[in-house]
Amino acid sequence: MADLILANFSMSTWLGIGACAQSILFLILPRHVALLPAVILLLLRLAKGVLITQGYIHNTYTDGAFMHKSTAPIPNDDGSIPTKAADKGLVVFILGANTNHPMGIFAPGFKDVGGFFQNMWKDAEEDSEKWGYLGKTRGMPMSTAGGNAIVSISYWKDIEHLHAFAYGPTHRLGWDWWAAQNKKYPHIGIMHETYAVPKGGWENIYQNCHPIGMAQIKYPVRESKDAVPKLVSTIMQAKGGKWRTMTSRMGGEEDEGGEY
């Protein structure tokens, strides 16, 4: 949520807020005391940056990152890794909401949009087998020419499952609300992009990265037919064999050239 709020306003707005806060401190405190918070903060940030750059302290920014070459295949139904890379197709669905309003995500009606989105994702996750839902990325704030947008990338087994979800009751609630309210809230925009990718038509690689894209997904799998589904991450080291190159990760023959 903090990232969304930070991205909601322009740099000049945040600078203005900071200037007002600093001015208030000057009005109620002695000057040398009013300056201390900003000076101490900048000195601490500078000191930490220098110490990390020089190798004197641990670089906390790499915590949680995959520091080796990794990939995230789609697992089999029982959670095992496929013997052939990219042996399943998938649908990539990008869904976003845009606000063309001075208040950004705090604009009238935008909270309602967020609520419908949350309910849809909750329904997809709770009944993932029915909807063929594989998972999604966290909501990502994006700046546009006229305002701000929040975008999520989701992954589905096939287009038929995605269509079924679109006509399901939870999505229909949001759909009907938008049809009735879009004239009332012309500053709110809704967008999506859909990519149906056949097997052998996708791959992924991550190195020195925090989880992003398909690396964020935890797939619902069953170790046996009657077992309770559990969520598992398939992120693994892309080392040799079918995981070594882009071509081999897309199910093709292993390349003789360098790794990438």
Image (cartoon, rainbow, N blue to C red):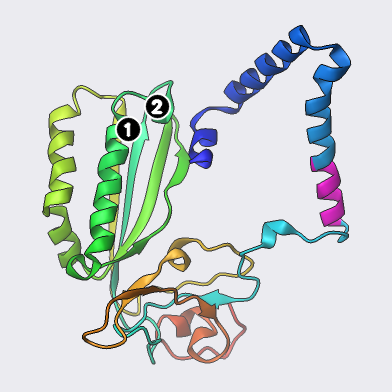
Q: Is residue 206 magenta?
A: no
Proximity of marks 1 and 2: CB atoms separated by less than 8 Å = yes
Q: In the rendered image, which quarter is residue 174 located in?
A: top left
Q: Is residue 52 magenta?
A: yes
Question: Is 8 placed left or right of 159 in the picture?
Answer: right
Q: Which residue is label 2 attached to?
A: 106
Residue placed most toward the observer, 249 or 247: 249
Q: Which residue is label 1 attached to?
A: 111
Give the CA distance from mark 1 to mark 2: 7 Å
The single residue placed furthest to the top in the displayed view is: 27
Tell me the SS state at disc 2. helix
Q: Earlier in the sequence, mark 1 or mark 2?
A: 2
Question: Is 34 placed left or right of 246 in the picture?
Answer: right
Is there any visible trace of residue 178 in the rendered image? yes
Which quarter of the rendered picture does the C terminus lie within?
bottom right
Q: In the rendered image, which quarter is residue 47 located in?
A: top right
Q: Please give the label number shown on residue 220.
A: none
Residue placed most toward the observer, 96 or 260: 96
Is there any visible trace of residue 146 in the rendered image? no
